[in-house]
Structure formats: C-alpha cells, structure tokens
Image: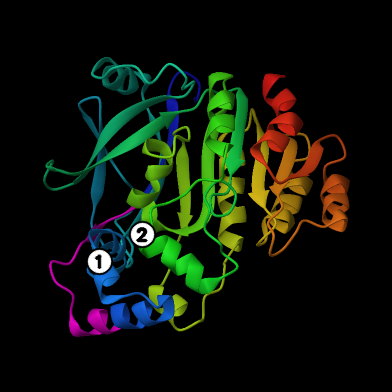
Amino acid sequence: MYDDDWRVSFSGIAWRTPVTLNRRQRLMVRMLGNVMKATPEQLRSEMFERRIHPFMAGAFKKLPIAIGIGGRSFPLRKPTRRNGRFEDTMIIPSSAIDAALSQQSASDDWQSTRTISFDIHSREKEIPLARGTLFLIPRFGVSVISDIDDTIKDSQVGNRRELLANTFLREFRSIEGMAEVYQQWATQGAAFHYVSSSPWQLFDALKAINTELGFPHGTMHLRNFRLRDQILNRFIVRRRGKAVEIQKLAEAMPDREFILIGDSGEKDPRIYRKICRKYPDRVRGVFIRSVDHKPFQEEHTYKLAKSLPQGVVAAFRSADELLESANQLILQ
C-alpha cells in the first residue's frame, strides 16, 4: 500500500495460440518427442497439446493495453515488447480497489492476502482480452519467496529428459508435505511469491500448484524461455533474472520481511547469498531443500550463514524438517 492508495505492479505476456502448427513447429515437436523418447500416443495426448501450444504461440507486438479495475481503466505507459511481454508499476486509487473488492466475494479464510480480479484490454477497444488476479499485500508482514522446481514440485531439473517429460507429458507432482506447510503459514499471515526458472509459457499450467496441489495462491515470477535451446541441448538455467525479481519484490515492499526457500540442485544458494548481503536486516531465514543429485554441502551453509549473521540458515530434506526449522520465524 502506498499512503492511502495502492502501488501495483503488473506483468504478463500477450500471445495468440496457433490453431494449427506450421512445418517448423511440427519439426520442433518431433525433435522434442525424440529427446523425451515419447510415444506417438503421448504426443497426441490432450495434456501434451495443452502444454506445448503456449510455446508455439505468436506474440502480440507493440500492443497498447490497459488494466480495468473497479470500473476504471488504467493504461500502461508502454506497449507490449517484441516477445509480447508487458510490465508496469502504477499507483491505483483506493476507491478503485474498494469498488473491485465490493464486486466479488472474500478470499478463502486461510488466505491472509486479499485478491481481486481485473481486466486486460487494448486502449482502443475496452473489450476484455483476458483476466488477471491482483494480490493486495499488506505493508507489514512476512513474505515467503519460494522456488518451484524441485523445491515444492518434483521436476528433476538435473535430468534433461525427465525435466522435459515432467513438463510436457505428466501431471505435476508436489514434494510430499510442502503444500500443508505453506498452507499453515498462510493461516498465520504469510504472503507467498513464487520466483522460478520455469518458463512463462507454463503460467496457466503452474496454476495447478494452487488449484490441484493445494499451495497457497501468490504472485508468480517466471522467466523468458526458448524451447529451441532446450531441444538442442543448449538449455542454460539463467538465474540472474531470478535475483532481479527478488530484488524487485524487496524494493516494492520495503517494510516487509522475507523467508527464502529453494533447493540445492541449481543456483539458489548462491543467489540467496547475494540477497542476504543486500538485505541482511530483512531476511529472517534461508531454507534449502537438499536434493539427491546435488546435496547441500556444509560449506554452502557456512557461506549463507556468514551472509546472514542474524538470521536462520538450514538445509532440509522433508517438509517436517522445514516446518521445525522455519515455523518460529513465521510466528514472530
């Protein structure tokens, strides 16, 4: 909240899902199937079609758009980029937020963070193109910043074939017990922000972590991604963007404190160490899930603890271990 009004950040991608795939796209699908060793039946499945189509979508370039909240329209300062991405931060009057809240039912009882729906439309025609969700985060409190892959969702990032199969061919599976831990923290007042190296094209699919896997709703921050790089074995986990997103959250909510949760399989410990050095008085704790293919080493714990001398740093393998280590920080 900004004085009596709300400081709101919007981001997304405007795209058009193809009705049919062109020759180049069909070739890419065959290459992807070969990498995953998928059967023809799997590549014709409804799940694969649903997951792959956003990666084949065409972007709406230079589209001037506006946000509709509480019966009012708020134009974004810049049109969509070449890849369809848009983002902006603006001050929304409390009157518009209050009007939107009055038009819908309250959030679930266990959700401390209120949400409202908003319309996305072009500036020229106020015909809704899509709907979005706005999270109203209180000025003070605790925010949990959580990774997704191999932290709360079983992705097997260390195995390219399994990662792709888990992305395109299988239902998402949660890490046992993690949804229950996060739900408990939500009832205790924590807000949630999912900051991940998962691609933006999976945004709709990743809503399953809330609707099907039972994790609390929260803001979602994903990365740009080119499927061609993954298929051609040029996949590089670009974690620099993740650090930037966390810094944006910290700067947008200067009075909130944070708990960082990730895994040892990629670059989370290194990124979180930088965040701890930058915001040592605002990070209550860092908790790293130790994965089998790349266990969390004692030296990593030491480096993190050195960057966060007044906070809690711990590794965990199970949700129970995380709850035991971190629950006291949520309750403070």
- Residue 61 can be seen, yes or no: no
Does the stretch in magenta take in 14? yes
**Percent position (x, y) of residue 101?**
31, 19
Cα distance in 3D space between marks 2 and 1: 9 Å
The 10 Å Cα crowd at callout 1, few under 14, some 14 to 19, many 20 or more, is: some
From the viewer's perspective, is 176 left or right of 54? right
Q: Quadrant of residue 168?
A: bottom left
* Residue 188 in view of the camera: yes
Q: Which residue is mark 1?
A: 57
Label 2 SS: helix
The span picked out in magenta is 12-27
Give coordinates of residue 21: x percent, y percent: 18, 75
Q: Is residue 286 left or right of residue 182?
A: right
Residue 223 appears at what percent x and percent y?
Answer: 47, 59
The residue that disc 2 covers is: 201
The amino acid sitting under disc 2 is Gln
